[in-house]
Amino acid sequence: MREQKGQHPQSVEIDADDASVSEHVRMSRRLFLGSSAALVGAAGTGLGAGLLSPSAHAASHDGPSIEVKPGELDEYYGFWSGGHSGEVRILGLPSMRELMRIPVFNLDSATGWGITNESKEVLGHSEFLAGDSHHPHMSMTDGKYDSKYVFINDKANSRVARIRCDVMKTDKIITIPNVQAIHGLRVQKVPYTKYVFCNAEFRIPHPNDGTGLDDIEAYYTMFNAVDAETMEMAFQVIVDGNLDNTDADYTGKYAFSTCYNSENAVTLAGSIRNERDHVVVFNIERIEAAIKAGDYKTLPGADKVPVLDGRKGSKLTAYVPVPKSPHGMNTAPGGRYAVANGKLSPTITMLDLHKFDDLFAGKIEPRDVIAAEVELGLGPLHTAFDNRGYAYTTLFIDSQICKWDVEKAVRAYNGEEVDYIVQKLDVQYQPGHNHTTMGETRDADGKYLISLCKFSKDRFLPVGPLHPENDQLIDISGDEMKLVHDGPTYAEPHDCMIVHRSKVKTDKLWKRDDPFFATTVAQAKADGVVLEKDNKVIRDGNKVRVYMTSVAPNYGMDSFRVKQGDEVTIVITNLDNVEDVTHGFAMVNHGVQFEIGPQATASATFIAKEAGVHWYYCTWFCHALHMEMRGRMLVEKA
Ligand code: RUQ
Ligand code: CUA
């Protein structure tokens, strides 16, 4: 495998006559297409478009119907990360209809996320509204989704957020201390999600205060565990190399992360010198015991967070050598295997999780936990599993999903003559993550696979230089994978996970005692205001709190009076007790607008800079007289 200069970065040329290249790679899609450039280079030209046209490559639609007719409900919830849009999206499967967006690390004008006082409290001190969300994962009990929370990382600002699944709103965000770029995130599966595991990717000096800038060898990064209930740091573990993705096992004892840059370099060339990098295995029991024994240090600015040394040689970790720059880390639902996806190697490495106890007991060597190195094709990034012993790996460079037989792959690795590859399905194009229905849990059901394709090229109407991505739905319930839907998505779903609808229970109305607006309720109480009935203006120096109710199509006040320069807080309590009757509030020319769900209280604060009449109005269509739901803020000249 050689990098070619001056081409699309995905281009890697394979020499079909090279004897070291195996049959599986030689038969890859790129060679089949006749030229290494055909796929990425020419797909937009006449030739490429012809070769890869939907008629030539789309699946035939003779599989089970995926149509969800008007009025029917989807079978699954899909939780999609929004990548550098910073949000999380809920899709219905198999229709692939977008059901909801959950703002997390972004500003959202419809809901007022980043504008309301309640959302600002969640955003806390790290009020950046430009996040990069990658990996959404739901909390589990006994290896099954429990529908309490969905956790999501922000690579751009080293944060982890939690979404409450009863109301589907973000309720906590933590900035992970003393690290940069939280990337891989997964939850402890067993016995329940006590920890959210998250990898900090980039190595930095410690302390990172301007000293040690050039002492590259001394840089390090850390593996992190956040307490899922309190959303506070549980511990951090110093590692060698850069951490990429992570997953946990089905005993609750281990978590493991792919780890590149074993060279500890700071440049691209430097970090791909070694032939092998690692999977770092974290022994959670030993880490907890070390914390109990006080065997840790702390770092500046986070004096309550235990920091343990897990670099090579530590008893808390094991470094399993795997081909260089591994990427995705995926545990199979059977609980026996996890795979590290090769990325720069055409192989994935299967780890036998049942051997980890022996590894930590010193009975075997790190390489002894490898159950197989399985050659699949070019650019394996992520693997998903069904409940029938098959795995599905994205091949980024080949633009394919490779379906393979897990047990046969182990037998082939041990010298038996068996073909473990079941099928290669073309996807459009360059898939990153994939995910099967319930596939990261014990409830894997093998019905659908999602391929998150980074490029859509010719699959949709052109919309300018910026293209949507293409999230493809694949039916995997039969012997053959069948592509059944192309789903354009906006930047950039890195990852998703798919939960059967029977697992998810959401509320239809807010509860008046919801902690989401508890601070606002407490302030009202201090002001002697009963939110459920009062419409009052409370003055507190130059701070003015305007309390009003809303019942379609009226606000409790059609005008209120303040003075120029006042800091005005609008607090609205939506008394409508009816599912789906959400009101909004926008103060014209003030950059203020937000949602007030049924039975919720929401508030926002701004300065009344200009004297005069300023209209406010309802932004969510709530009633035949929605347009008339408005009022005046009368600002007296200072
Ligand atoms: S990573 S395309 Cu951020 Cu999940 Cu693999
Ligand atoms: Cu209330 Cu529209």
Image (cartoon, rainbow, N blue to C red):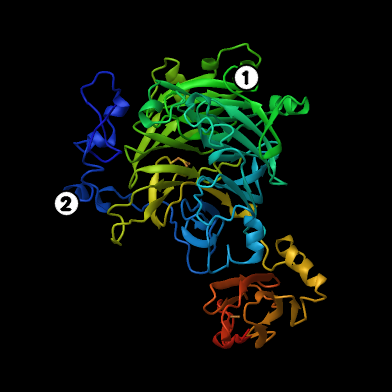
Q: Say if 29 sits above or below 55 in the image.
A: above
Q: Which residue is disc 2 drawn over?
A: 46
Question: In front here: 229 or 308?
Answer: 308
Along the viewing direction, whichever of 608 and 347 lies nearer the viewer? 608
Q: Is residue 510 above or below residue 58?
A: below
Tell me the distance, in whole angstroms, between the alpha carbons under discs 2 and 1.
57 Å
Front-most of residues 555 and 479: 555
Residue type at the position of mark 2: Gly
- Answer with the quarter of the image where residue 412 lies: top left
Q: Position of residue 233 (x, y in %)?
A: 68, 40
10 Å crowding of disc 1: few (<14), some (14-19), many (20+): few
Q: Note whether residue 262 is visible.
A: yes
Number of disc labels:
2
Tag in front: 2 or 1:
1
Q: Secondary structure at mark 2?
A: helix
Q: Position of residue 442 (x, y in %)?
A: 61, 38
For residue 396, side relative to residue 72 (left or right): left
Which circle's residue, 2 or 1, is located before the other in the chain? 2
Give whichever of 623, 200 is nearer the camera: 200
Residue at horizontal 53 percent and vertical 53 percent from the top: 78
10 Å crowding of disc 2: few (<14), some (14-19), many (20+) = few
Task: Please state the horizontal and vertical placement of residue 100, each as a whole percent of the image.
Answer: 54, 62
Query: Does residue 202 appear left or right of residue 603 in this picture?
Result: left
Residue at 60% from the left image edge and 71% from the top image edge: 595
**The C terminus lies in which quarter of the figure?**
bottom right
Question: Which mark, by number, is residue 314?
Answer: 1
Residue 356: give x, y in percent of width and height. Answer: 61, 21
